[in-house]
Amino acid sequence: MKIGRNDPCPCGSGKKYKKCCIDREIVDFKPQKTKESWTPEKVDKMTTDSIFAKLRELGIDRDEQSFAKEIKAQKSGDELSSKWEASSNVVESNSDIDFIYPAIAVLAKRIAPDHILVSDLNEMMQDGYDLIEAQQDEQASDLWWKLWRSILKWLVPRQVESIEQLDRLTSTDMMQSFFNWVQDFEMLLENTSQDNSRYIEMRYQLATEFRKHFPQSNSLTMMNMGTAAAESLFLIDKMEEANQLFEQLVLEDYEIFDKVWIYIRWGDLYTKWFGNNYFDHERARTLYEKALELADDNSKRDVEMRIKDLEEGQ
């Protein structure tokens, strides 16, 4: 039988299938014959006192005050669930062991609603991908903007200087890497801004904040975010600031290949086909020629094709 994306995961974790084993090969999962798995939706129908009473049956003695203090010291519900299982000697054969994770998720929302868990970030991320799949790009952009604000808030007590470091901290709780997601988000905003200009400024802010909070990220990602910010400035008629940012980017410590693409993307802004009223093919050619000076055999073809297009378009 096909498993629905929003059905409880057959592994018994208590999570939705789309947030758990959807990307894994599922073999030999036998349906629960004796009882249904605990899910956050099922636990949410219980009173807070009843949830704590059920936890005490499992040897986990907590109340609202102790839970609030404990959850605020954790980055994820999975992290706390593992600690509880280990410290309370809950055996895996216990038929109610799958109650722990959804109980934590529900209690966290009730008792510490302002505390962000990695599971919250994962949920917003996956819901955004679902909206994109349903071709609701503006709704996805708005949800992922909320996710981005939540990520920055989650980072506050932590020393994280690269997107790769963030992924190392959260990989066990996420279905998708932040490295991939942030680039998907930037491209989503670029596409969405073609129909709604407010997403241009959102793209500029995302790219600028990324460079501020993750300065040790890999060269290519930093370059892409830098040029995305500069392009956004250009599109909101801040030409001088856009050029200043491009001038700054070519002076930064990037790989040669990345610097080639800084000049290419800078030159693209001055072409007729970029779709604005500021085209200047002489300026574009000058920038392409600077790219050509740095280009290897592969990237030379990209530059030469652009120069040829300029000649044919004049």
Image (cartoon, rainbow, N blue to C red):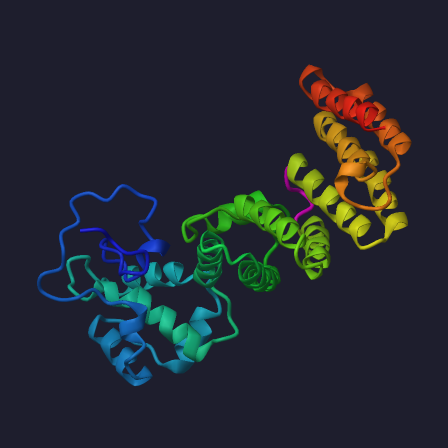
Front in this rendered view, residue 295 or 66:
295
Residue 253 shows in this picture: no
The x and y percentages for residue 29 are 17, 49
Would residue 215 be counted in the magenta stretch?
yes
| Picture quadrant where residue 52 is located | bottom left
Q: Nearer the viewer, residue 110 or 138?
A: 138
Q: Position of residue 66 (x, y in %)?
A: 40, 77
Residue at horizontal 45%, vertical 56%?
134
- 155 left or right of 21? right
Q: Residue at x 67, y 52 (%)?
A: 194
Most frequent secondary structure within the magenta stretch: loop
Instruction: State the residue at coordinates (16%, 62%).
Output: 94
* Residue 27 as seen in the image, left or right of residue 245: left
Give 221 or 276, whichever is nearer the viewer.
276
Horizontal side, residue 35 vs residue 38: left or right: left
Q: Which residues are magenta?
A: 214-218
Q: Residue furthest top?
A: 297
Where's residue 250, x and y in %?
Answer: 82, 34
Q: Is residue 251 magenta?
A: no
Give the residue displayed 58% in from the left and 49% down from the top. Answer: 182
Q: Which image quadrant is residue 58 in?
A: bottom left
Pick the quarter of the image with the C terminus.
top right
Does residue 270 sit above or below 186 in this rendering? above
- The percent position of residue 97, horizontal first and vertical second, equals 22, 63
